[in-house]
Image (cartoon, grey):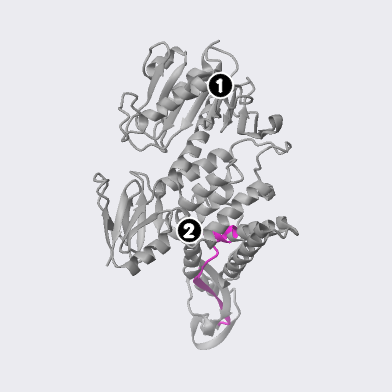
Amino acid sequence: MLRVHRHPRHPGAASPERVADAWVLDAEATWVVEGPPEEIDDVVADLGGGVCERVAAGVVLLRFGNAVGRVNRAGSLGALTVHSGKWTAKDYDQLLEDLSRVTAALPFSTSSPSSLPYERDALNTRNVLYHAFVWLRHSLLSDHTHDLHDAICGILRDPHRRLVRTSRVVPVELAGRVGGRSLDDVASGRWPIVDHPLGFVVGGRRVLPVQVMEDRSQESVDTAENRFVRAFLEECLWVVEQSRRHLGHDESHLARRVRQDCERLNKLLVGWRRAAMWGEVGVMTHFPASSSVLQRRHEYRTVLRHHMMLRLGSRVPLDPQTVSRLLESKDIATLYELWATFTVLHEVTQLLGRPTSSAHVVTNPKGATVSWGLVAQWPNGIKLAYNPTYTRTSGFHGLSRSLQVRPDIALFVPAGLNAGLHLLDAKFRLDGLLNPEADDDGTSFKSSDLHKMHAYRDAIPEARSAWVVYPGAENTAYFDDGRLGLAAADVGFVKGVGALSLRPGGGRAGLTAVLRAMLLSPT
């Protein structure tokens, strides 16, 4: 029998406990699993080397990092629920939903060859299609990821049903259930009648109708939720087919491997799509966003999350490494940084109105490709760049004095009291304020983030201010003229460094105040 306990180096972590059918573990802690070597083998096989460190035949260490969510099987341990502090898979889903909603509102241009795609047909671009295929291959073919597979199989075994009332005309001798409407039809003479000794007395005669209307209630799987799952499967099949088509006649080793993966995916998806239940399920005409089944039932919620991941590649310019972190490990830190970035864009839009353009800009100065990611621009010349790169020769409204740097957000203000460049970096932090006075003793990583903001300003002379955005509860600011705290930003002069709280469902007054001072201060 396996035993689970936290590593002595993490005495503050919560003790493992079983809730329902799963062990609940802190992602930040290192967990020790001890037991028979053959059972340890099963745990390692299910969780993989990214989580497991085998230190002895009967001992393995588990480190989840920033991964959150449910692991359906970890050997004889069974299911695991991994949470990060107070952050759970529900927070992950909420971040993903918010990110999808914010990016869906961006006015991407369809005429520019460098614009971000916004329709399904635009998924057919090579880069976005690659993201979708990588996601699909990992979700369905990986030895260590089974949640989507289990969800689809669970839906096919026990799909959501609803009661449907139907009516049909049947011979009276075959009627199983006669309601009030049928009796009204008989009394009103709707149906032909015949004499019968067991019939109704009508005008001195005993008669029965030849036929009656029978009401029936039967279960149907033609629900909005099942239509959504059907549309999801068809979109997955479309991604596989388009990926295979893009290979053309390429016979390289990589192409052959991708082609084999396409065959495996197609076989799996076609098998699901041919299930008998889909014969009763219609075509999705609207996305059932308000469905409680889609939000609460585990199998349908899992399909919804994967649907969002499929769509994410068409909205956000992600590099393959980021895609891997999001899709393979459910890295809530990576997702938080993306969510925070686009939430800042949303806040700027609330202050200035919708941007006139949003584009994915790529330049090639002197043969060196430099990606500026997403660039949004407003009529007054204010621009916001996602993931800009600064070198000695190029950058978004500025250059680096020395090494290459890449903040998450660069906000350029062309005129006014705070004209210049303002930088923001999203960092996943669970507790407390970033404390610049904390000793660098190896146990605190928070002060290093403010040090990084100073480094941004030192490296990029055009940068007036630099801010950490993190999911804490407090805000702070250190201005160049000695003022402290966000209240000092009310005077409108923003030049310094600070930390701003930004958490899903929480207040964002600090961020709004700083952005308002940057963007709306008088000239």
Q: Which x, y percent locates residue 309?
A: 54, 50
Residue type at tag 2: Tyr
Residue 427 belongs to the span the image colors magenta: no
* Total tally of numbered discs in the picture: 2
Rendered position, 318 above or below 229: above
Residue type at tag 1: Arg
10 Å crowding of disc 2: few (<14), some (14-19), many (20+)? many
Would residue 372 appear left or right of 245 to someone viewing this image? left
- What mark, if any, has residue 443 been given in the picture? none
Q: Nearer the viewer, residue 229 or 344?
A: 344
- What mark, if any, has residue 401 been given in the picture? 1
Q: In this picture, which residue range is highlighted in magenta?
A: 209-232
The answer to whether one can see residue 329 in this image is yes
Q: Which x, y percent locates residue 274?
A: 60, 70
Q: Which x, y percent locates residue 279?
A: 60, 70
Would residue 170 appear left or right of 23 to someone viewing this image? right
Q: Are marks 2 and 1 in contact (CB under 8 Å)?
A: no
Give the residue number, with chain letter if any, for mark 2.
300
Q: Which x, y percent locates residue 186?
A: 54, 75
Rendered position, 185 above or below 347: below
The answer to whether one can see residue 207 in this image is no
Residue at (57, 60) in percent of width and height: 227
